[in-house]
């Protein structure tokens, strides 16, 4: 990826637009004067309710300076239980080293810079959700042309930072149509501020419904613009009672409970086993695997954004210790001509190198630590995670009460919303119930119509040898094999329509055969020919999927208000379930969604509700 900025007299300058990212008179002071004071954020943050929320929208993320300023002010001014959501757009995101260098100019923001840089990698085109301060502050970065990304935003802002480069050099970010879109995604009484006082900007704001006025500018600029939305915008819609029951203690349920609890919800997490992640989420290792399409399908877009969100979540929440997770490379091998063509089409899309890039056989072998017959795509920041450790972390919030129940559950409407019944006894009642029970998600009267599909998968655990310990990357092809954890390599998995969960020797033999084709060198290092499939440990689980391969995320349908789902994640739960938890919470809290509106719509379970 080519550098985005240059440096002139110690200040960052955009190579593309030939304009400065902030005032030479003082970028930090300019941001505070124009955007914080211009939107009256000090007093508005301080006036928030104890559990209040505030949304800032921005056109032009740039160096992230405005975001860090808003985050710092929010920490200092807002009540401890309040939350900030910051939505920003950027067509040309900076490389990590560029962003870090620019933000180091402001020592007062050093702690916030470090928090951002701990999670920041060059974001690919798409939607990127970041969480800071244990979920009190969220950043949603929309990478792409703001004229298109903001149209697909599901959410509304209370204040806007209009911060494109000069209208003369970057007219796209000041077009009347874009400012009309800004107004459409604003709440009643929303404000806006910008350093620009150009007549065209004033006219465009007025045409969009804002009342704009001049205010004292910063530095050499005598004047700036402030504005307020005069016509009715979107009112805030939040539930009066913030209580929920989440059914299912795997990845989907734990993620949903975590996202709600971090927004102040009292959440009961109901699991039918005596521990979390006891079923499909219970393998010792799960691959951080993003199989993408060059055609931008809804599934590929979800996987791309979910993959990057899960990586940010792990960096923020779990130690990368080789026990709970590891950030080793993931190699998707071009094992046949069709796969090679698919990978070539992906490579031509220009993803950032720190997300994925092509690697020939020699480089791939060096990354893997073992000889490989072919190259493929390398995901440098991928790796694997112990799913149980992630579920435990997600369910650790004090607002989550764990509840183990052995018998079948029923759902019944009540005056308060929903009752959860076990053998006729009410074990929980709340306005909201989230069904995230994997293959059991269709076992309720209200969900029995859903065409959920069940697939059995078995992995095999292979004792590591001194030679196999050389493996330093996850290898993916017809099957998958991972570097050893606790002395065992995980490999597989099989895929059948059967329903049993007993590990079988036949599936162990199939996994060994797939490993021999995937990596003959590793197969030999493990002395695979001498391994007895009947004596090897294996683990089988049932994956829940859907006919269109997309998970079911969101409200069930209009006939069951307050009943939501997060299920049918298939074999991609590590990638799609955490972001789906955020999608559910965003819907319930009326906050900006972590995915574009059309993709949020595509995930709704109502797509499978028969039309009456």
Image: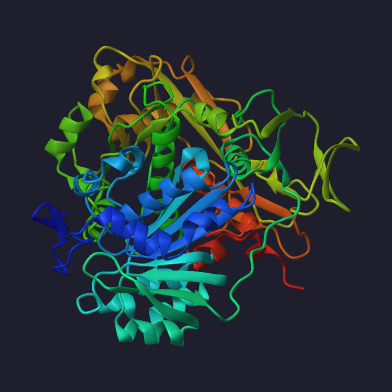
The residue under the point 25% across, 20% down is 524
Please provide percent x and percent y for residue 237.
67, 63
Please provide percent x and percent y for residue 550.
53, 56
Question: Which quadrant of the figure contains the C terminus?
Answer: bottom right
Q: Which residue occupies the foreground of this view, 284 or 84? A: 84
Left or right: where 461 falls relative to 64: right
Question: Which quadrant of the figure contains the N terminus?
Answer: bottom left
Seen in the picture, residue 389 relative to 78 is either above or below; the reply is above
Instruction: Count numbered badges in the picture.
Output: 0
Q: Which residue occupies the foreground of this view, 217 or 595? A: 217
Q: Please tell me in which quadrant of the rendered image residue 247 appears.
A: top right
- The residue at the far top in this view is 466
Seen in the picture, residue 447 relative to 160 is either above or below; the reply is above
Seen in the picture, residue 570 relative to 188 is either above or below; the reply is above
Q: Please tell me in which quadrant of the rendered image residue 106 appears.
A: top left
Q: Which residue occupies the foreground of this view, 609 or 160? A: 160
Left or right: where 538 falls relative to 277: left
Q: Please tell me in which quadrant of the rendered image residue 53 appears.
A: bottom right
Seen in the picture, residue 11 relative to 470 is either above or below; the reply is below
Q: Does any portion of residue 189 appear in the rendered image? A: yes
Q: Does any portion of residue 124 appear in the rendered image? A: no
Please provide percent x and percent y for residue 342.
28, 56
- The residue at the far left in this view is 9
Left or right: where 421 falls relative to 342: right
The residue under the point 8% across, 55% down is 9
The residue under the point 18% across, 37% down is 364
Please provide percent x and percent y for residue 569.
54, 47
**Colour scheme of the rendered structure:** rainbow
């Amino acid at each position: 990826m080519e550098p985005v900025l240059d440096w002139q007299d110690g200040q960052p300058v955009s190579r593309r637009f030939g304009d400065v990212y902030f005032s030479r008179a003082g970028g930090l002071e300019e941001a505070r004067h124009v955007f914080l004071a211009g939107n009256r954020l000090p007093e508005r943050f301080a006036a928030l309710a104890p559990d209040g929320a505030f949304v800032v929208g921005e056109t032009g993320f740039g160096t992230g300076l405005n975001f860090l300023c808003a985050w710092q002010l929010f920490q200092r001014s807002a009540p401890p239980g309040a939350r900030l959501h910051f939505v920003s757009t950027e067509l040309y995101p900076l490389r990590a080293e560029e962003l870090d260098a620019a933000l180091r100019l402001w020592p007062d923001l050093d702690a916030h810079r470090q928090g951002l840089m701990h999670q920041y990698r060059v974001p690919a085109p798409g939607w990127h959700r970041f969480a800071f301060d244990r979920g009190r502050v969220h950043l949603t970065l929309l990478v792409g042309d703001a004229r298109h990304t903001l149209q697909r935003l599901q959410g509304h802002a209370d204040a806007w930072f209009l911060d494109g480069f000069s209208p003369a050099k970057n007219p796209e970010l000041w077009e009347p149509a874009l400012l009309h879109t800004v107004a459409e995604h604003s709440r009643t009484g929303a404000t806006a501020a910008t350093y620009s006082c150009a007549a065209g900007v004033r006219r465009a704001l007025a045409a969009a419904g804002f009342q704009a006025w001049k205010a004292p500018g910063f530095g050499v600029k005598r004047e700036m613009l402030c504005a307020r939305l005069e016509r009715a915008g979107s009112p805030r819609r939040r539930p009066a009672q913030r209580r929920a029951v989440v059914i299912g203690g795997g990845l989907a349920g734990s993620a949903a409970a975590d996202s709600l609890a971090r927004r102040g919800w009292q959440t009961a997490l109901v699991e039918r086993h005596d521990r979390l992640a006891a079923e499909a989420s219970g393998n010792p290792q799960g691959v951080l695997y993003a199989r993408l399409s060059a055609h931008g399908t809804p599934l590929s877009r979800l996987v791309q954004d979910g993959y990057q969100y899960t990586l940010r979540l792990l960096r923020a929440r779990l130690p990368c210790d080789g026990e709970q997770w590891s950030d080793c490379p993931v190699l998707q091998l071009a094992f046949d001509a069709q796969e090679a063509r698919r990978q070539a089409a992906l490579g031509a899309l220009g993803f950032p190198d720190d997300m994925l890039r092509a690697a020939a056989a020699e480089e791939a072998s060096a990354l893997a630590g073992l000889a490989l017959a072919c190259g493929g795509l390398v995901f440098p920041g991928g790796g694997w995670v112990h799913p149980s450790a992630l579920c435990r972390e997600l369910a650790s919030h004090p607002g989550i009460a764990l509840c183990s129940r052995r018998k079948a559950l029923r759902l019944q409407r009540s005056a308060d919303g929903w009752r959860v019944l076990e053998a006729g006894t009410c074990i929980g009642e709340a306005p909201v119930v989230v069904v995230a029970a994997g293959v059991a998600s269709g076992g309720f009267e209200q969900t029995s119509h859903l065409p959920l599909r069940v697939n059995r998968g078995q992995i095999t655990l292979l004792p590591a040898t001194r030679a196999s310990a050389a493996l330093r990357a996850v290898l993916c092809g017809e099957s998958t094999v991972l570097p050893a954890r606790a002395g065992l390599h995980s490999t597989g998995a099989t895929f059948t329509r059967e329903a049993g969960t007993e590990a079988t020797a036949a599936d162990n033999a199939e996994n060994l055969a797939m490993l021999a084709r995937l990596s003959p060198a590793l197969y030999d290092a493990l002395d695979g020919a001498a391994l007895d499939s009947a004596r090897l440990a294996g683990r089988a689980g049932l994956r829940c999927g859907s006919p269109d391969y997309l998970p079911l995320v969101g409200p069930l349908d209009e006939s069951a208000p307050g009943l939501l789902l997060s299920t049918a994640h298939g074999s991609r739960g590590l990638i799609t379930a955490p972001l789906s938890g955020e999608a559910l919470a965003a819907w319930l809290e009326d906050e900006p969604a972590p995915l574009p509106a059309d993709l949020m719509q595509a995930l709704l379970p109502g797509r499978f509700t028969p039309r009456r």
